Image (tube, grey):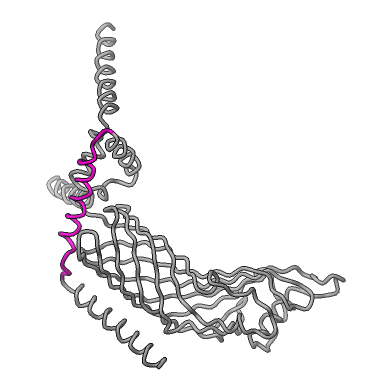
Amino acid sequence: MIKLILYMIIVSGVSFSQDKEKEENPCVDPTISYARKHGVKALPARDLFQYHKASKACKEMGGDVLIDQISINEYNRDFEQSKFMSGWTSTYGMCVTAIIFYYFVGLITVKK
Amino acid sequence: MKCQILQFRSILLLILLVPLFGQPKVSVDLGMGFYEPTMKGFDKNDLVAFPTGNFITRNILFNFSTYYEFFNNARIGYNVLKSIDIGRLEGFETSKPVFYRTISYRMFPLETFFRLKPKLELNFTLTPIWGRGRITLETKPASSEDGVGHTITDDWNELLNSFGDENPLSQVASENGMRSDWFGYSGMLGYRYYFRPWIGVDFKMGFLNNNYNKDRWRFQGKKVKGPDMKIDKIPIFSLKLVYALK
């Protein structure tokens, strides 16, 4: 029985101390750590609210650089992935441009 | 056998885990479209005075869309642009029925894109359109003041006659909407600016081509004539807010 009570005290102590640390420093929130690694858009939808809340709190605590860095990393990651058109996508883009160009040329010339 | 199960589990685990660390795939867009159709059937109708057309009911389209990015530079989606008009009809013999009109341009776009800069994207869209027009009258049976025999059927016949349909309906059931479907296509060039990695503003311009025919409306299983509208070969612009969910 004594062992059980001791165990409960230790477990609750550890968990309370973690909460306190989290309250003191919102920048250690797991959603922020996850977003640092994989980007905000990789977060599950259910964690988005928690992330926005934590990032706001983190900014207020002076963690602007950290949150900005997450955004910059994400911009760069997306940019790296799609700065060049690959495969068939460029041909498709050219076709769309040509179709729209000829449509507007036709529109102007018909009106004239 | 055990080995095969283990292999299957590993493959399944891999399939399930890989998308978790992938890049954003799904986005939801909300915005507006602008176009300029010619709606002769409503605006220049000699028999029925339809609600006066204004910028919101004639030129604005409410836009909702969702996209899935299936490739680094390409996404597919579902895009609805909707025009709405509501009001009371004047010019009927005894009643003033409430009139609803919606035109939906349902698109299934294939869009390719690339980023000019980390925050700027240029996109190219081609899409088939499944358009649908719907007209509803909310009217009361025997709606004349003296209660002498003016029925829903009479109201509908007056409306259809105003569209040039001289073949009147004999009886109208309680379900009182007429609709028409057509196909078309559209092409758009877009410019997107991300002011957060997951939120952006998207501006598109292009054209809308609909194969609309006023003789292809249906009302309770019967072919009827609808309003005269010119919705083919018209320029279209859209402005929307993009939110990347995942």
Q: Position of residue B99 (x, y in %)?
A: 65, 70
Is residue B128 depicted above or below A79 in this figure? below
Is residue A104 depicted above or below A68 in this figure? below
Q: Is residue B37 left or right of residue A103?
A: right
Towards the viewer: B139 or A59: A59
Q: Residue at x 30, y 83 (%)?
A: A101
Q: Is residue B55 left or right of residue A111?
A: right
Q: Position of residue B239 (x, y in %)?
A: 39, 66
Residue B108 visible to an observer of this rendering: yes
Is residue B108 depicted above or below B195 in this figure? below
Residue B12 visible to an observer of this rendering: no
Magenta segment, prevailing SS (helix, strand or loop): helix
Q: Is residue B163 left or right of residue B107?
A: right
Is residue A68 depicted above or below B215 in this figure? above
Q: Position of residue B44 (x, y in %)?
A: 62, 84
Towards the viewer: B5 or B137: B137
Outermost residue to the right: B146
Towards the viewer: B162 or B36: B36
Q: Residue at x 39, y 93 (%)?
A: A110
Q: Residue at x 64, y 88 (%)?
A: B164
Q: Is residue A77 magenta?
A: yes
In which image quadrant can residue B178 be found? bottom right
Towards the viewer: A83 or B145: A83
Q: Position of residue B157 (x, y in %)?
A: 70, 81
In which image quadrant can residue B91 be found? bottom right
Q: Which residues are magenta?
A: A61-86
Q: Is residue B9 magenta?
A: no
